[in-house]
Image: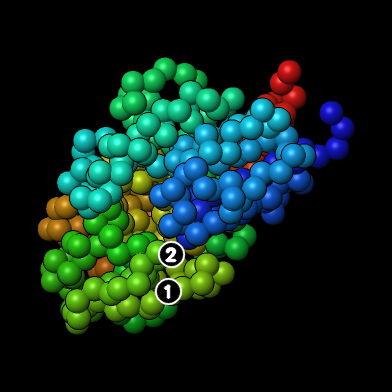
């Protein structure tokens, strides 16, 4: 088959998966993202009406949530697991409505998509293992970690004065936003937690002298936001392969994060930051305070993280691995 493949990526907007697939669309000839409003993902059968695949498509690349909605006899199907939240551990960190949807329709859709896909990829070793184990499935999964544009997200001189700690993400229980006020209570007076609203959040946290909202930040302005901070705080419950951590590391920030899910695959304890037990606000505050008091340690860890990104998590590394996968399914008989 001559010429670039025609690859369509139908998926919901306003999340990390959309950012990653958009990076692919800017780097791979013939790759385009067909985005739709997240609300339509609750009704998978109607999705092809909003993101039609078309007859000339060689490969459909989407997520397991609605992979089978875009299954076509004419096109190969590549499903990427960007995160997994259907296991029992996540029930207490999800709403009642989410749990009902997860354990009924969504669980069935995940199984069908993973079975039907020509290739399944996952963004972390943790996500691949958890999804297969929890769904009781056996099949090969290729792990392709998310990559970051290391030229756009690059270190700049950090501001003088009080220490600014960045929380970047949706203000949800899954991201650990509920613990931010308690962590802030325990921080030094010269430390401020600056938080964004993320891609899907409209609210804000309670007023607090050491919490500062910067609202919803356009993605193109995020390098500026990272470089206006001194370290990243990620008290999350579950992550597939968090872009906020990758982008912060690329900007030369140390990271204080939860010791869970895929985060140990990114944050090297004592080298690039610290990992704390999930929900342990004392541990998070202690680690943040220690780094706030030690400029040299912050700089050492930030440099370590920048080097780690350049070695293992660049955009070009990610794109090359997806290109091989997409070409392999396109070439299969």
Q: Can the viewer see residue 167 in this picture?
A: yes
Q: Is residue 286 above or below residue 59?
A: below
Residue with the mark numbered 2: 199
Q: Is residue 88 left or right of residue 305?
A: left
Q: Is residue 63 left or right of residue 331?
A: left
* Among the two numbered marks 2 and 1 on one chain, the one whose residue lies closer to the N terminus: 2
* SS of the residue under disc 2: loop
x then y, percent, for residue 113: 48, 31
Q: Is residue 88 left or right of residue 114?
A: left
Q: Residues within 10 Å of mark 2 (few under 14, many from 20)?
A: some
Pick the quarter of the image with the C terminus.
top right
Task: Report the residue at 17% width, 73% height from top.
Answer: 188
x then y, percent, for residue 301: 39, 55
Q: Nearer the viewer, residue 18 or 164?
A: 18
x then y, percent, for residue 43: 44, 48
In the rendered structure, are the residues bearing label 2 and label 1 in contact, judged by CB atoms less than 8 Å apart?
yes
Q: Can the viewer see residue 310 in this picture?
A: no
Q: Which quarter of the picture shows residue 196?
A: bottom left
Q: Nearer the viewer, residue 269 or 129?
A: 129
């Amino acid at each position: 088959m001559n010429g670039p493949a025609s690859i369509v990526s139908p998926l919901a907007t306003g999340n990390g998966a959309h950012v990653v697939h958009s990076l692919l669309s800017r780097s791979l000839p013939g790759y385009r993202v067909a985005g739709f409003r997240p609300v339509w993902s609750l009704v998978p059968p109607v999705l092809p009406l909003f993101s039609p695949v078309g007859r000339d498509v060689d490969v459909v690349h989407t997520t397991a949530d609605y992979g089978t909605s875009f299954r076509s006899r004419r096109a190969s199907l590549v499903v990427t697991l960007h995160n997994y939240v259907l296991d029992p551990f996540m029930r207490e960190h999800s709403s009642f409505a989410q749990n009902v949807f997860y354990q009924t329709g969504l669980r069935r859709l995940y199984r069908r998509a993973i079975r039907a896909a020509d290739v399944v990829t996952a963004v972390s070793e943790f996500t691949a293992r958890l999804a297969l184990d929890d769904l009781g499935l056996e099949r090969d999964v290729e792990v392709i970690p998310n990559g970051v544009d290391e030229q756009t997200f690059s270190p700049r001189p950090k501001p003088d004065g009080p220490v600014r700690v960045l929380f970047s993400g949706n203000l949800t229980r899954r991201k650990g936003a509920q613990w931010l006020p308690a962590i802030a209570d325990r921080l030094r007076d010269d430390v401020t937690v600056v938080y964004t609203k993320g891609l899907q959040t409209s609210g804000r946290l309670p007023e607090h002298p050491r919490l500062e909202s910067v609202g919803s930040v356009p993605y193109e302005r995020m390098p500026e936001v990272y470089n206006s901070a001194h370290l990243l705080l990620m008290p999350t419950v579950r992550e597939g392969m968090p872009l906020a951590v990758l982008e912060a590391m690329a900007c030369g920030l140390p990271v204080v994060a939860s010791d869970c899910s895929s985060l140990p695959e990114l944050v090297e304890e004592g080298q690039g930051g610290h990992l704390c037990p999930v929900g342990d606000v004392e541990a998070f505050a202690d680690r943040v305070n220690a780094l706030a008091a030690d400029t040299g340690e912050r700089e050492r860890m930030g440099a370590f993280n920048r080097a780690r990104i350049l070695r293992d998590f660049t955009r070009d590394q990610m794109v090359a691995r997806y290109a091989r996968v997409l070409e392999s399914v396109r070439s299969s008989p």
